[in-house]
């Protein structure tokens, strides 16, 4: 059992990583139906929240089916983060997550997200203030350090634990790496195996298959894994990992009919959640990935990523089902299922 505050999760817990304009409620509900154990909102700017930004409030809306669910906050000012924490709690999440890992220039270079890796004392002070304010467990998501010359995550994790965080998620890359190169799971394991670390350690980075998830648990000893980009258009990855961990067998890829049904449900929920056209715009990256690897798919894919008409998209999905329903999934390109 993995415990975050009073939240009890399964051993070898699976988390959906927060991704801006991707992990909205429509996608989170689909992932929950496919076995994810815990999820976090798209990140919410503390400054936007306290200015009563409608988009920030919208991101924090919770359906009970999503629980356990955390609201992720980011910012560079302690007072703003404290005030935002109080406002986030009014939406009744199960925990508060602090983003100290986003490497985007517009965030990190303003001293928020991964920018706080250059000012760990401020990161710790901010975390302490939020922990003291919040009635909920507080978790942190961060990276190994600012760059290869400044990898300080072991010490940082200890300092964050000292001020009361309930769990830490570590993306095994530095800020400078962005999303390039391989994630450094050795340093994640170093944190997990440090005798002074008592909180759950969740590993993040390059988990894109049942095998890579099992390797993370078996060889690095983490309490959970957080999966991001590999789930885009592939929410069934969570259930596939669970099956593999339990049985040692990798399940067959969903049939085309199953994929079409998932895609339709996701599309309609996205439109319901964000309206049209935004709900369709932000579905496009998912729709193209749901059917990645199908042969002679260029023209159909073009419709999926250009149409703004709900009925046309549903008709296109029906066309995919009728045209490819008997397609042998073993003939898909090798990187079309779990590997992203």
Image (spheres, grey):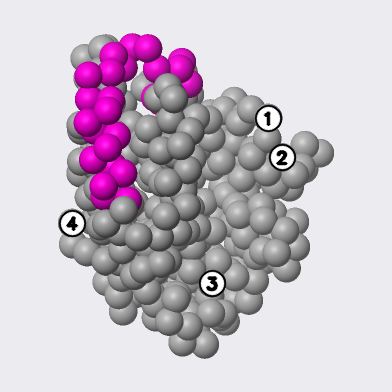
Does the CB distance between marks 3 and 4 fall below 8 Å?
no
Q: Which residue is mark 2?
A: 177
Could you say which quadrant of the image residue 9 lies in? top left
- Which span is picked out in magenta? 313-338
The residue carrying pointer 1 sits among few (fewer than 14), some (14 to 19) or many (20 or more) residues within 10 Å by Cα, namely: few
Q: CA distance from mark 3 to mark 1?
A: 28 Å
Question: Helix, strand or loop at disc 1?
Answer: loop
Residue 65 marker: 4
Which residue in the protein does label 3 denote?
45
Residue to which mark 1 is pinned: 181
- Residue at 37%, 74% in the rendered image: 58
Residues under labels 2 and 1: Cα distance?
A: 7 Å
Mark 1 vs mark 4: which is more N-terminal? Answer: 4
Q: Are marks 3 and 2 in contact (CB under 8 Å)?
A: no
Name the side, left or right, on which 158 lies relative to 333.
Answer: right
Mark 4, other Cα within 10 Å: few <14 / some 14–19 / many ≥20:
few
* Residue at image location 31% in from the left, 53% down from the top: 312
Q: Which one is nearer the viewer's eye here, 89 or 267?
A: 267
Q: Are marks 2 and 1 in contact (CB under 8 Å)?
A: yes
Q: Using the numbered discs, state the Cα–Cα distance from disc 3 to disc 2 in whole angstroms.
A: 23 Å
318 falls in the magenta region: yes
């Amino acid at each position: 059992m993995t415990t975050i505050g009073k939240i009890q999760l399964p051993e070898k817990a699976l988390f959906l990583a927060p991704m801006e304009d991707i992990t909205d409620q429509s996608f989170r509900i689909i992932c929950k139906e496919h076995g994810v154990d815990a999820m976090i909102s798209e990140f919410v700017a503390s400054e936007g929240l306290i200015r009563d930004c409608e988009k920030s409030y919208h991101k924090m809306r919770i359906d009970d089916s999503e629980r356990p669910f955390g609201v992720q906050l980011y910012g560079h000012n302690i007072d703003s983060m404290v005030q935002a924490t109080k406002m986030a709690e009014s939406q009744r999440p199960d925990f508060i997550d602090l983003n100290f890992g986003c490497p985007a220039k517009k965030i990190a270079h303003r001293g928020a997200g991964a920018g706080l890796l250059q000012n760990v004392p401020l990161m710790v002070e901010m975390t302490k203030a939020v922990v003291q304010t919040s009635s909920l467990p507080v978790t942190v998501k961060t990276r190994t350090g600012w760059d290869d010359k400044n990898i300080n995550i072991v010490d940082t994790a200890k300092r964050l634990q000292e001020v009361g965080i309930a769990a830490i998620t570590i993306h095994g890359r530095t800020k400078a790496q962005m999303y390039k190169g391989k994630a450094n799971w050795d340093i994640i394991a170093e944190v997990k195996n440090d005798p002074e670390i008592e909180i759950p350690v969740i590993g993040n980075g390059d988990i894109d298959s049942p095998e890579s998830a099992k390797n993370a648990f078996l060889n690095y000893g983490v309490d959970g894994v957080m999966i991001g980009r590999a789930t885009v258009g592939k929410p069934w990855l969570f259930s596939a990992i669970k099956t593999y961990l339990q049985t040692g067998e990798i399940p067959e890829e969903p049939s085309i009919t199953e994929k079409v049904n998932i895609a339709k449900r996701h599309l309609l929920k996205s439109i319901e959640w964000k309206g049209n056209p935004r709900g369709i715009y932000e579905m496009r990256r998912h729709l193209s990935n749901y059917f990645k690897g199908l042969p002679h798919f260029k023209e159909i894919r073009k419709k999926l990523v250009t149409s703004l008409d709900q009925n046309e998209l549903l008709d296109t999905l029906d066309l995919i089902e009728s045209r490819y329903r008997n397609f042998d999934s073993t003939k898909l390109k090798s990187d079309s299922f779990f590997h992203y």
